Image: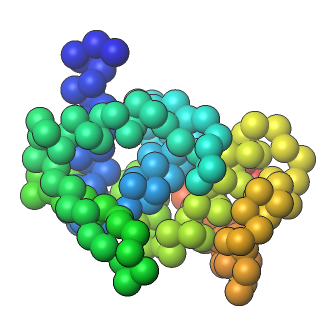
Amino acid sequence: MTHKNITSEIDEIVDIVATANGNLIGRTRLQKTACLLTMAGLSDRFSFIYKHYGPFSQDLADATELATLFSNLSEEQRRTQWGSTYSVFTTCTKATTRIDSPRARMISIANAADPIELELATTAAFLAKQGFNDPWAETASRKPEKIANGRLDRAKCLYKRLLAIDTPKPLPAI
C-alpha cells in the first residue's frame, strides 16, 4: 500500500463518517456502507471478501485504525448492556460529498438502518455479485440466527430503498 493509497483510503473513511452527519455507529456499519458504495460504483478504495459478518475489507479495517491516529476521525469504544463493545466514529470534518448526491443518500440510508438488517441486505447484494442464484436464501442459510423476527423481510425492504438510488453501477436486482 502506497502513501497516496492510504491517504485516499483515510480520506474516504472520514468522508463516509462526515457524510453521516459526523457520527457513525459500528465497525460493521462502516464496512457495510463502504461495501455498498463500492458495489454501486460510488467508491473504488476498497475490495471486499466474504467473512462471518458478510462482506469485509481488511484494507478498510487497517485504514480505519490509521485514520483514528492520523486524521480528524475519532473512535470511542462503548460497552453494551451484555458486556461486548462497539465503536462510535465521529469527525468534525466537513463532508466533501454533496448532500443531494446518490452517495450521500446511500450513506444516510445505511446510517439510519438497523445494523443487522444492513448486514443482511449488504450480504445478499454481495452474494448476488458473487453469482449466487438466490442470494436471500443463501444469506438466510449463512445467518439463521439473524433472520428471526422479520429481520430478513425488513432487510429486503431496506435493500429496495438502496436499489432505488440512481448509481453509476446498479446494485444487483434481487
Q: Quadrant of residue 118?
A: bottom right
Which residue appears farthest toward the front when viewing the image?
83
Image coordinates for residue 173, horizontal then vertical, percent: 75, 53
| Quarter occupied by residue 23 | bottom left
Res 70 visible: yes
Q: Quadrant of the N terminus?
A: top left
Residue at image x 35%, y 66%? Answer: 85
> Residue 77: x and y, percent?
25, 63
Q: Residue at x 66, y 53 (%)?
A: 123
* Res. 161 in view: no
In the rendered image, which quarter is residue 112 located in?
Answer: bottom left
128 sits to left or right of 11: right
Nearest the viewer among 134 and 58 is 58
Q: Residue at x 27, y 55 (%)?
A: 17
The residue depicted at 64 percent of the width and 41 percent of the height is 50
Image spot of residue 152 (x, y percent): 72, 73
**Which x, y percent locates residue 41?**
52, 38
Relative to 151, is 33 above or below? Answer: above
In front of the other: 63 or 16:
63
Asked if residue 50 lies left or right of residue 24, the reply is: right
- Asked which colour scheme the image uses, the reply is rainbow
